[in-house]
Amino acid sequence: MKQTEFLNVVLPFQDKLYRLAKRLLVSREEAEDATQEILLKLWSKNESMGKYKNVEAFAMTMTKNFCLDRLKSKQAGNLKLVHSNYSDENTSLQKQLEAEDSVSWMERIMEDLPEQQKMILQLRDVEQYEFEEICELLDMKPTAVRVALSRARKTVREELIKKHNYGIG
């Protein structure tokens, strides 16, 4: 596979790889490094890439495994907690602060979810993957994915309601 073919295949889902890495690793810098590593690994496999039925699913699985390995490694203690800022120049300062606060709370709540629920919620609600794709990516049965997604959404909803009703705790 030539470089242009490779780029045509990989570039459409490069952002998804980054967002999954960011969700798992939290730090923007770590997610960027992880994405670069995965792209390098994919390039090293470019000769055999044609045999994969779904290159995007393969790359997402590689990203998930790489990030989980990174979190388990000794380097995990060095990961920085850097949250990206939400900004929209067309909103008032008050609305922008409220939006940043909401995004921040969502990120914090998602970080506390079990890894599997966190990944499923990211893939389904953020990346808009179909259930079949998530089942394939995570090697899970559809019922298990739906249950985990339901539990993750319920936890997020309850935590947001708790924060809204009782303030920051």
Image (cartoon, helix red, strand yellow):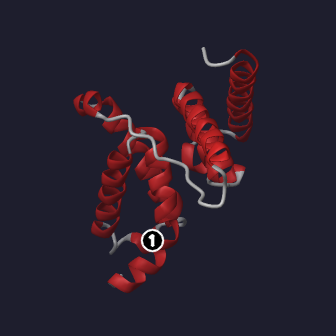
Point 45% across, 41% down: residue = 83
How many labels were placed on the picture? Answer: 1
In this rendering, position of residue 48 left or right of residue 89: left
Point 56% across, 53% down: residue = 87
Q: Classify residue 166 by image quadrant.
A: top right
Q: Secondary structure at mark 1?
A: helix
Residue 24: where, in percent of width, then height? Answer: 45, 39
In this rendering, position of residue 9 left or right of residue 158: left
Residue 93: where, in percent of width, then height? Answer: 61, 47
Point 60% across, 41% down: residue = 97
Image quarter hosting the C terminus: top right
**Residue 4, placed above or below residue 23:** below
**Residue 165, placed above or below residue 69:** above
Image quarter hosting the N terminus: bottom left
Outermost residue, front side: 93
- Say which amino acid is labelled 1: Val
Point 65% across, 61% down: residue = 90
In this rendering, position of residue 157 left or right of residue 72: right
Closer to us: 51 or 117: 117
Closer to us: 110 or 68: 110
Residue 63: where, in percent of width, then height? Answer: 42, 50
Dot 1 alpha-carbon crowd within 10 angstroms: few under 14, some 14 to 19, many 20 or more: some
Q: Classify residue 76 by image quadrant.
A: top left
Q: Classify residue 59 by image quadrant.
A: bottom left
| Residue denoted by label 1 | 10
